[in-house]
Image (cartoon, helix red, strand yellow):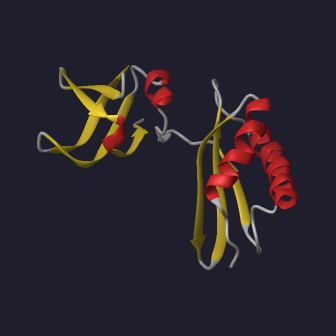
Amino acid sequence: MGLINIEKVRSLVSPVLLELGLELVEARFVTEHGQPTLRLSIDREGGVAVGDCQKVSREIETLLEVEGSVSGRYLLEVSSPGLDRPLVKGADYVRFTGKMAAIKTREPIDGRRNYKGTLQGLLGEEVLILIDGQEYRVPLSLIERAHLVF
Protein backbone atom coordinates (compact mmCIF):
# COMPACT_ATOMS: atom_id res chain seq x y z
CA MET A 1 0.00 0.00 0.00
CA GLY A 2 1.26 3.47 -0.84
CA LEU A 3 1.81 6.25 1.62
CA ILE A 4 0.45 9.73 1.15
CA ASN A 5 1.71 12.77 3.06
CA ILE A 6 -1.62 14.61 3.16
CA GLU A 7 -0.12 17.92 4.35
CA LYS A 8 2.37 17.89 1.47
CA VAL A 9 -0.46 17.09 -0.94
CA ARG A 10 -2.45 20.08 0.37
CA SER A 11 0.52 22.42 -0.03
CA LEU A 12 1.16 21.23 -3.60
CA VAL A 13 -2.46 21.16 -4.73
CA SER A 14 -3.70 24.48 -3.31
CA PRO A 15 -1.62 26.79 -5.59
CA VAL A 16 -2.65 24.82 -8.70
CA LEU A 17 -6.32 25.11 -7.74
CA LEU A 18 -5.91 28.82 -7.01
CA GLU A 19 -4.63 29.36 -10.57
CA LEU A 20 -7.78 27.65 -11.85
CA GLY A 21 -10.03 29.80 -9.66
CA LEU A 22 -10.78 26.90 -7.33
CA GLU A 23 -10.20 26.14 -3.67
CA LEU A 24 -9.34 22.92 -1.86
CA VAL A 25 -12.14 22.18 0.58
CA GLU A 26 -10.90 18.84 1.84
CA ALA A 27 -8.12 16.33 1.17
CA ARG A 28 -8.39 12.85 2.67
CA PHE A 29 -6.63 9.56 2.25
CA VAL A 30 -8.84 6.51 2.78
CA THR A 31 -8.65 2.80 2.09
CA GLU A 32 -11.88 1.16 0.95
CA HIS A 33 -12.07 -2.49 -0.04
CA GLY A 34 -8.27 -2.61 0.01
CA GLN A 35 -7.97 0.29 -2.46
CA PRO A 36 -5.90 3.29 -1.27
CA THR A 37 -7.73 6.45 -2.40
CA LEU A 38 -6.81 10.12 -2.30
CA ARG A 39 -10.02 12.19 -2.22
CA LEU A 40 -9.91 15.86 -3.08
CA SER A 41 -12.98 18.03 -2.68
CA ILE A 42 -12.86 21.30 -4.66
CA ASP A 43 -15.16 24.29 -4.90
CA ARG A 44 -15.62 27.81 -6.24
CA GLU A 45 -18.26 30.51 -6.12
CA GLY A 46 -21.07 29.28 -8.35
CA GLY A 47 -20.09 25.62 -8.00
CA VAL A 48 -17.91 23.10 -9.77
CA ALA A 49 -18.59 21.38 -13.09
CA VAL A 50 -17.56 17.85 -14.12
CA GLY A 51 -15.02 19.39 -16.51
CA ASP A 52 -13.37 21.19 -13.58
CA CYS A 53 -12.97 17.89 -11.73
CA GLN A 54 -11.52 16.18 -14.80
CA LYS A 55 -9.02 18.97 -15.44
CA VAL A 56 -7.92 19.07 -11.80
CA SER A 57 -7.59 15.29 -11.74
CA ARG A 58 -5.24 15.29 -14.75
CA GLU A 59 -3.10 18.16 -13.47
CA ILE A 60 -2.88 16.92 -9.90
CA GLU A 61 -2.08 13.33 -10.87
CA THR A 62 0.87 14.52 -12.95
CA LEU A 63 2.02 16.93 -10.23
CA LEU A 64 1.93 14.26 -7.51
CA GLU A 65 3.90 11.84 -9.70
CA VAL A 66 6.58 14.44 -10.47
CA GLU A 67 6.83 15.61 -6.85
CA GLY A 68 6.90 12.06 -5.48
CA SER A 69 4.30 12.87 -2.84
CA VAL A 70 2.60 9.53 -3.32
CA SER A 71 4.29 6.16 -3.27
CA GLY A 72 2.62 3.02 -4.56
CA ARG A 73 -0.64 2.56 -6.41
CA TYR A 74 -3.64 4.66 -5.47
CA LEU A 75 -6.90 5.99 -6.87
CA LEU A 76 -7.40 9.77 -7.18
CA GLU A 77 -10.96 11.08 -6.79
CA VAL A 78 -11.75 14.75 -7.40
CA SER A 79 -15.27 15.98 -6.69
CA SER A 80 -17.36 18.92 -5.56
CA PRO A 81 -18.21 19.03 -1.85
CA GLY A 82 -21.90 18.45 -2.54
CA LEU A 83 -24.94 19.84 -0.74
CA ASP A 84 -23.60 18.91 2.70
CA ARG A 85 -20.36 20.81 2.09
CA PRO A 86 -17.91 20.62 4.99
CA LEU A 87 -17.09 23.90 6.72
CA VAL A 88 -13.35 23.82 7.30
CA LYS A 89 -11.97 27.37 7.49
CA GLY A 90 -13.16 30.48 9.28
CA ALA A 91 -13.87 32.04 5.88
CA ASP A 92 -16.41 29.25 5.18
CA TYR A 93 -18.61 30.46 8.04
CA VAL A 94 -18.57 33.99 6.61
CA ARG A 95 -19.18 32.83 3.03
CA PHE A 96 -22.18 30.74 4.05
CA THR A 97 -23.79 33.23 6.45
CA GLY A 98 -27.56 32.76 6.29
CA LYS A 99 -27.30 29.06 5.41
CA MET A 100 -28.30 26.12 7.61
CA ALA A 101 -25.41 24.24 9.18
CA ALA A 102 -24.68 21.48 11.67
CA ILE A 103 -21.72 21.80 14.03
CA LYS A 104 -20.31 19.18 16.40
CA THR A 105 -17.80 20.23 19.05
CA ARG A 106 -14.93 18.20 20.54
CA GLU A 107 -16.24 18.85 24.04
CA PRO A 108 -19.48 20.24 25.46
CA ILE A 109 -20.04 23.99 25.70
CA ASP A 110 -22.54 24.64 28.49
CA GLY A 111 -23.60 20.98 28.22
CA ARG A 112 -24.09 21.05 24.45
CA ARG A 113 -21.99 19.45 21.66
CA ASN A 114 -24.37 19.57 18.68
CA TYR A 115 -25.64 22.74 17.02
CA LYS A 116 -27.98 22.90 14.03
CA GLY A 117 -29.18 26.29 12.88
CA THR A 118 -28.56 29.31 10.66
CA LEU A 119 -25.01 30.60 10.35
CA GLN A 120 -24.67 34.23 11.44
CA GLY A 121 -21.00 34.61 10.51
CA LEU A 122 -17.76 34.78 12.44
CA LEU A 123 -16.83 37.07 15.31
CA GLY A 124 -13.12 36.84 15.98
CA GLU A 125 -12.47 33.14 16.46
CA GLU A 126 -16.08 32.23 17.22
CA VAL A 127 -18.78 30.95 14.87
CA LEU A 128 -22.17 32.55 15.41
CA ILE A 129 -25.14 30.25 14.85
CA LEU A 130 -28.84 31.03 15.40
CA ILE A 131 -30.98 28.21 16.79
CA ASP A 132 -34.66 28.79 17.58
CA GLY A 133 -34.13 32.53 17.96
CA GLN A 134 -31.10 32.19 20.26
CA GLU A 135 -27.57 33.00 19.09
CA TYR A 136 -24.76 30.67 20.17
CA ARG A 137 -21.01 31.28 19.95
CA VAL A 138 -18.87 28.27 19.11
CA PRO A 139 -15.06 28.66 19.23
CA LEU A 140 -13.41 27.49 16.00
CA SER A 141 -10.82 25.64 18.09
CA LEU A 142 -13.53 23.38 19.57
CA ILE A 143 -15.22 22.39 16.31
CA GLU A 144 -14.74 18.71 15.54
CA ARG A 145 -16.68 18.88 12.29
CA ALA A 146 -19.23 21.10 10.61
CA HIS A 147 -21.17 21.03 7.37
CA LEU A 148 -23.99 22.73 5.51
CA VAL A 149 -27.46 21.22 5.84
CA PHE A 150 -29.70 21.17 2.78
Which residue is nearer to you in this view: 50 or 40?
Answer: 40
Q: Residue 25: percent from the left, percent from the top?
A: 58, 41
Q: Residue at x 75, y 44 (%)?
A: 53
Q: Residue at x 66, y 60 (%)?
A: 38
Q: Residue 56: percent from the left, percent from the top?
A: 79, 44
Q: Residue at x 67, y 71 (%)?
A: 3
Q: Residue at x 46, y 24 (%)?
A: 96
**Across the whole image, how many numbered discs are drawn on residues?**
0
Q: Residue furthest left?
A: 111
Q: Residue 63: percent from the left, percent from the top?
A: 84, 52
Kindly indicate the quadrant of the structure image that contains residue 55.
top right
Quadrant of image for the C terminus = top left
| Horizontal relation, residue 93 to residue 11: left or right | left
Q: Residue 100: percent from the left, percent from the top?
A: 36, 30
| Horizontal relation, residue 148 to residue 73: left or right | left
Quadrant of image for the N terminus = bottom right
